[in-house]
């Protein structure tokens, strides 16, 4: 995936998260959970895009 495409996806996700946080009324606890879930998903997606997640999944612990 080209770097420009990754940057565009990050910008779109950031703007969507900002719009949800700004214009959709919800409890602060739900907002913080939503923000945490989005950040975790984006970090996992970035690790997968850059090939780091694939390397981690090949590691074996134990036998």
Image (cartoon, helix red, strand yellow):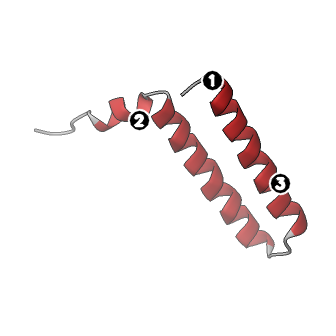
Of badges 2 and 1, the one in the foreground is 1
- Nearest-to-viewer mark from 3 and 1: 1
Q: Which residue is mark 2?
A: 53
In the rendered image, residue 59, in percent from the top left (x then y), is placed at: 26, 33
- Mark nearer the N terminus (2 vs 3): 3
Q: CA distance from mark 2 to mark 3?
A: 27 Å
CA separation in Å, label 3 and label 1: 22 Å
* Callout 2: SS: helix
Q: Tag count in the figure?
A: 3
Q: Which mark is residue 3?
A: 1
Relative to 9, say whether 22 is above or below: below
Q: Residues within 10 Å of mark 3 (few under 14, many from 20)?
A: few
Where is residue 61, by image quadrant? Answer: top left
- Distance of mark 2 from mark 1, alpha carbons? 17 Å
Mark 3 lies on residue = 18
Query: Closer to the N terminus: mark 2 or mark 1?
Result: 1
């Amino acid at each position: 995936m080209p770097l420009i495409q990754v940057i565009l996806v990050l910008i779109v996700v950031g703007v969507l998260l900002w719009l949800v946080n700004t214009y959709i009324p919800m409890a602060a606890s739900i907002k913080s959970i939503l923000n945490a879930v989005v950040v975790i998903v984006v970090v996992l997606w970035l690790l997968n895009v850059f090939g780091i997640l694939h390397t981690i999944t090949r590691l074996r612990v134990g036998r």
